[in-house]
Structures are given as structure tokens and as C-alpha cells.
Image: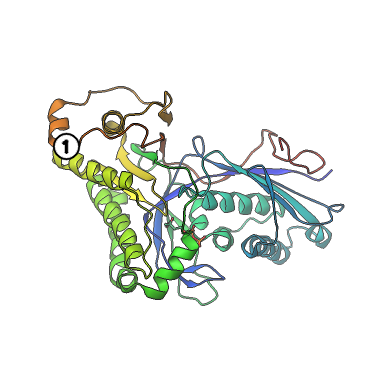
């Protein structure tokens, strides 16, 4: 009986954004990027894989639906892992010729700008690496699935070095610090919409590369300096510096989208109100206490220290009233000092319509992918998906 391997992998949220490729097929970026890996106890992709001699074709199920294995990105990941296994002679040739089954699911909304493909491909590549007994770095293989996926291969804060090699041998992820370095750091993900986004990241960045002058300036003159500065801020645990760079980089990424031709925008009115709220809050505090960042969707990701969580959640509940009894999910938090009237007066933003923010996920920095040993696979003994 062939082994079933099951992995879980984390979401990562970039603070210096990847936007634009120098090679579409190999998924090589124009600039370095840097992200925080989030705790898999709260948000994860889970993937089971198995290989057997009697499978006629490679098959895959994603979030409960059978999908085609004909995706180039998917096939590239599988081929690359097998090539590595062949080079490392980690399994025999018979095993390499067997077809595989893959079943994968996320515990958070797909394609809502919540980095689902990053966690998904990092998980697939981790599970395949275990199946084919590959022990070396697989971040460059995860990159072939989705660029940002390479950063989900490590925990803590992770840098994806763009590299200069045309074949991408120097384009992989490295860990800057592990998840224990800044234990007070917390993340709130504000889910303002969980519908599918309009312009995919892949399509959006293609338009930006072809048309945006701002992107050229960003790649050459802005990102290299920001990467150095944010790494220093992380090493020094300098939150206000970290936060300022994070917000500026998010804003510049969205400015690049608007500078593209035709322009496109991922931010909604609610996203803009969140931006305004965070700036007002920081101003009222006389110090940068919270940072926002937005990916290719309207959901906000807020970085803050643990001491700030209670007051920020109280503020969100006040400005964005909700009918959802489970408005905040994820980590529990201890009620601390309540929201002061001075802060509310200083912020001067009226409460908005109900349910503009659907829910909030409270999480923290976490570790990289892991192989599950609890036997809770998504495939049964016959290699068929369970629960479909
Ligand atoms: C805005 O990794 O989804 O989230 O490489 O084409 O699959 P592809 O794109 P993807 O792009 C992510 C872009 C981003 C910024 C980031 O995560 O760095």
C-alpha cells in the first residue's frame, strides 16, 4: 500500500510587494519582496498526495472540486520535484513513473486576495518533496506554481531574492528571522469581501510591466532601499519604522495599478476608509501603532503589536458595526483598556453602514509548512478524495 502524505502550509502577507515578472514562464520577479508567514493554527492550506502504479492519470481535487491537471504551473511543479528526486536518486525510477493523486483545501476564502495560491502551492510542493524524499530547498519549485508561494516555504519573516540569472537559479526564498524573533507581532485580516477578484495578480502585473513607468522607478530606485530598511527594522524590532515602510509599499503597489494602462484597482471604498482610519488612529496616538497592507483584493491586513489588538478591534467594531456574532475569529485576546472618548473624537470618522467588514481573522507570525502525522488525510486508502 502506497503512502499518503499530507502537509499543511501557511499564508504569507508581503510587506514589500512582489509585482511584475522578468520571466513569465519561470515566474521570475522584477524585484525582491519580503513577507511575514502567518500561523497555520489559524489559516492554512492542507494537501494530501499519493503515487500508485495502478493510477492511469495524474488527478487533482481543489476545495472539493475535481480540476484539470493540465495547468502548466501545476505540471512544472511536479516535473521539477521529480527531476530533483532523480538527480538526488532519492527514489527509484519506477516510483517516479507512477501517476499521482492530489487533494487540497484551504480553510479561508480562495481568490479573495488572501494569498490562497501561495499557501496552496507551498503545500503541494512540500507534500511532493516528502513523497519523493527530496530534502533540499524547494522554494524555487514552489515559485513555479505562484511567485509568492516561495515565501510560504519558510516561517517568520522571509525574503524572496529576485536574482539575476535568466534561468532563475538565484531566485528563491530565504528566512530573515524565525517566528520567535518578534513574538509580540499580531496580524488582523479584515475580510471586506469574499467574492472572486476581477483582475488576477498574474494578469494585473503583466499590464503593469508593459505600461507603468512608476513600476520601473519602483523596481530600480525604491524597493532595494526599502528591503534593506525593513530588514533593519525587523532586526531592531522597530515597529513604527516597519509600519511606515509597510504602508508606503502597499500604497505604491496600488499606485502602480492605477498607473497601468488601462488602470485597475483592487481597493474599494471600504479599503480606503480603513486606510483613513489607521492614519487617524496613528495620529491620535502620536505614534505609528498600526500598519495596513493590501494585496490584489479589497481585504486589509493590519500589523500591530499585541498590546494594540484589543483597542484596534474595539475601534473596528465601532466604525464598522457588524451583525456577525463571530465577527472576530482566530486567536483569543484579553480585554484591556477600553476605547477612550478622546481617541474617538480625535479620529473623527462616523460609524459606517452595518456589515461592510464581514469578519476579522486574528493571527500571528508562524512557522513554515509541516507534514502531518495525525493520519487525517484528504485521500483514502484507494487514493480517492474523502468528503467529496
Ligand atoms: C499582490 O504570487 O499571486 O500578493 O506569481 O502570477 O502567481 P503569480 O502572482 P502571485 O502575486 C502576488 C502579488 C501580491 C504581492 C505579494 O504577495 O508579494
Looking at this view, is 137 or 165 the one in front?
165
Q: Is residue 33 above or below residue 103?
A: below
How many numbered dots are placed on residues in this image? 1
Describe the element under mark 1 as helix, strand or loop.
helix
**Quarter of the image containing the N terminus?**
top right
The residue that mark 1 highlights is 347
Q: Position of residue 47 (x, y in %)?
A: 64, 45
Measured along the vertical axis of the image, is residue 180 above or below residue 247? above
| Residue under the image location 40 percent in, 64 percent down | 32
Residue lying at the far bottom in this picture: please name it. Answer: 166
Task: Report the side of 227 relative to 43 (left or right).
Answer: left
Q: Quadrant location of residue 318? A: top left
Q: Residue 265 at x, y = what percent? A: 36, 58
User: Residue 329: image x %, image y %?
Assistant: 44, 30
Residue 344 placed where, x, y %? 17, 31
Q: Which residue occupies 51% across, 57% down?
A: 150
**Residue 227 or residue 213, whichever sits in front:** 213
Q: Nearer the viewer, residue 56 or 161?
A: 56
Residue at the image position 28 percent from the left and 71 percent from the top = 221
| Callout 1: CB less than 8 Å from ligand 1 | no
| Direction from residue 47 to residue 197 in the image, left or right | left
Left or right relative to 211: residue 69: right
Residue lying farthest to the right in this orientation: 54
Amino acid at each position: 500500500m502506497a503512502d499518503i502524505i499530507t502537509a499543511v502550509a501557511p499564508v504569507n502577507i508581503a510587506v514589500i510587494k512582489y509585482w511584475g515578472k522578468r520571466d513569465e514562464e519561470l515566474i521570475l520577479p522584477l524585484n525582491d519582496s519580503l513577507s511575514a508567514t502567518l500561523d497555520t493554527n489559524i489559516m492554512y492550506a492542507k494537501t494530501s498526495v499519493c503515487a500508485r502504479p495502478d493510477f492511469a492519470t495524474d488527478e487533482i481535487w481543489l476545495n472539493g472540486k475535481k480540476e484539470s491537471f493540465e495547468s502548466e504551473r501545476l505540471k512544472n511543479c511536479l516535473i521539477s520535484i521529480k527531476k530533483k528526486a532523480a538527480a538526488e536518486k532519492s527514489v527509484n525510477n519506477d516510483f517516479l513513473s507512477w501517476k499521482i493523486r492530489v487533494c487540497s483545501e484551504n480553510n479561508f476564502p480562495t481568490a479573495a486576495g488572501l494569498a490562497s495560491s501561495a499557501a496552496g502551492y507551498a503545500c503541494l510542493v512540500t507534500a511532493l518533496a516528502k513523497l519523493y524524499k527530496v530534502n533540499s530547498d524547494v522554494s524555487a519549485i514552489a515559485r513555479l506554481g505562484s511567485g509568492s508561494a516561495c515565501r510560504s516555504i519558510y516561517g517568520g519573516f522571509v525574503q524572496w531574492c529576485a536574482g539575476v540569472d535568466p534561468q532563475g537559479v538565484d531566485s528563491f526564498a530565504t528566512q530573515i528571522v524565525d517566528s520567535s524573533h518578534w513574538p509580540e507581532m499580531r496580524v488582523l485580516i479584515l475580510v471586506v469581501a469574499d467574492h472572486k477578484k476581477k483582475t488576477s495578480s498574474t494578469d494585473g502585473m503583466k499590464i503593469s510591466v508593459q505600461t507603468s513607468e512608476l513600476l520601473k522607478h519602483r523596481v530600480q530606485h525604491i524597493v532595494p532601499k526599502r528591503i534593506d530598511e525593513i530588514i533593519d527594522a525587523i532586526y531592531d524590532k522597530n515597529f513604527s519604522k516597519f509600519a511606515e515602510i509597510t504602508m508606503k509599499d502597499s500604497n505604491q503597489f496600488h499606485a502602480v495599478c492605477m498607473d497601468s494602462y488601462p488602470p485597475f484597482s483592487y481597493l474599494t471604498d471600504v479599503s480606503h476608509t480603513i486606510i483613513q482610519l489607521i492614519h487617524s488612529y496613528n495620529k491620535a496616538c502620536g505614534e505609528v501603532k498600526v500598519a495596513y497592507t493590501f494585496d490584489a483584493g479589497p481585504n486589509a491586513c493590519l500589523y500591530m503589536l499585541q498590546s494594540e489588538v484589543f483597542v484596534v478591534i474595539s475601534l473596528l467594531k465601532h466604525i464598522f458595526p457588524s451583525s456577525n456574532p463571530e465577527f472576530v475569529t482566530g486567536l483569543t485576546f484579553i480585554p484591556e483598556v477600553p476605547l477612550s472618548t478622546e481617541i474617538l473624537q480625535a479620529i473623527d470618522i462616523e460609524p459606517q453602514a452595518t456589515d461592510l467588514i464581514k469578519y476579522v481573522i486574528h493571527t500571528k507570525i508562524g512557522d513554515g509548512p509541516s507534514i502531518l502525522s495525525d493520519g487525517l488525510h484528504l485521500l483514502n486508502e484507494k487514493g480517492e478524495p474523502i468528503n467529496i
